[in-house]
Amino acid sequence: MSETGTTRHVEQIMGLPVTLALRGRHARSPEGLAAWHDVVASLRDVDRMFSTYRADSAVSRVRDGSLRLEHAPPELVEVLAIAEQARVASDGAFDVQIPSPDGSRTLDPSGVVKGWAIERAAALLDHLEATDTCLSAGGDMVCRTRVVGSTGWRIGIEDPRAPERVLAVLPIVDGAVATSGTAHRGQHILDGRTGLVPRGVASVTVVTGSLTWADIDATAAFAHGPDAAGWLQTRPDRTGLVVWKDGTTTSVRTPAA
């Protein structure tokens, strides 16, 4: 995003660069800055609750048995309910119970948490009148347009084989964009059914109204490997771009339910 008149704030949270871009009335106002501070506080709370690297997080305590799920914070219960919906919708390709080579499974809801947390934090910006906002974490983002006459945000989709190159530019007025792939984190996505790294796909980008579901569906489609585009075609109100290992691409656009 290179529009003039844009103010940006950046903070490292949840192990990711979180960026807020503001245009319009509150781009440089005290209200805009206060909203950014609220976003940061919200995301830090999420990190304390969901980090798998903190022994005192709710997720870690559920994993080690020191916290029963019925006594867990409601946010964790909500995320796990979303995860179960995603597991069913993806025929098990997306699963927060991560399979290990020995056949055991370990709870790791990170595949839901990032999109859910950013979408939740973006709601803290909704009161900024006449202001365009774009809240991004690690490239997944929620974009809103509130300035009269604004053309929205132009979001570049990078080439996973050469991240400095842009494959496509998407105009987003009100919506969410998420990409899952190997360009920055290597082979970190597993097929929840097999525990194996999916074959044939380099990245999947999904655009829809909810970042929670854009992020889940990008990961789930990637986990389907050669069936990525076919599975994404079953999801309502999605625009997607699948980049295959050989550099070819498949575009997906589905109608609303």
Image (cartoon, grey):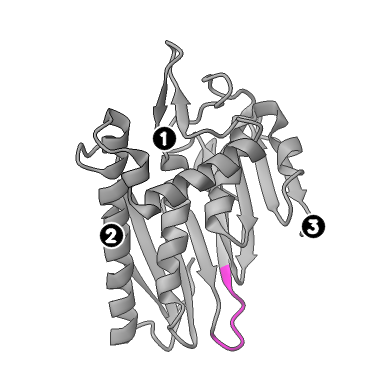
Gap between marks 2 and 3, in whole Å?
Answer: 36 Å
- Helix, strand or loop at label 2? It is strand
- The amino acid marked with disc number 2 is Glu
Q: Position of residue 161 (x, y in %)?
A: 54, 35
Q: Residue at x 72, y 47 (%)?
A: 235
**Kind of residue at disc 1:** Arg
- Write down the residue under mark 1: 185
Alpha-carbon neighbours of circle 1 within 10 Å: few (<14), some, or many (≥20)?
few
Q: Quadrant of the C terminus?
A: bottom right
Q: Earlier in the sequence, mark 2 or mark 1?
A: 2
Identify the amino acid type marked 3. Answer: Pro
Residue 152 on the magenta segment: yes
Which residue is tagged 2? Answer: 11
Is residue 31 in the magenta section? no
Spatial CA span between label 2 and label 1: 19 Å
Residue 147 position in % (x across, y down):
54, 85
Mark 3 surroundings within 10 Å by alpha-carbon count, few (fewer than 14), some (14 through 19), many (20 or more): few
Q: Which mark is residue 255?
A: 3
Q: Earlier in the sequence, mark 2 or mark 3?
A: 2
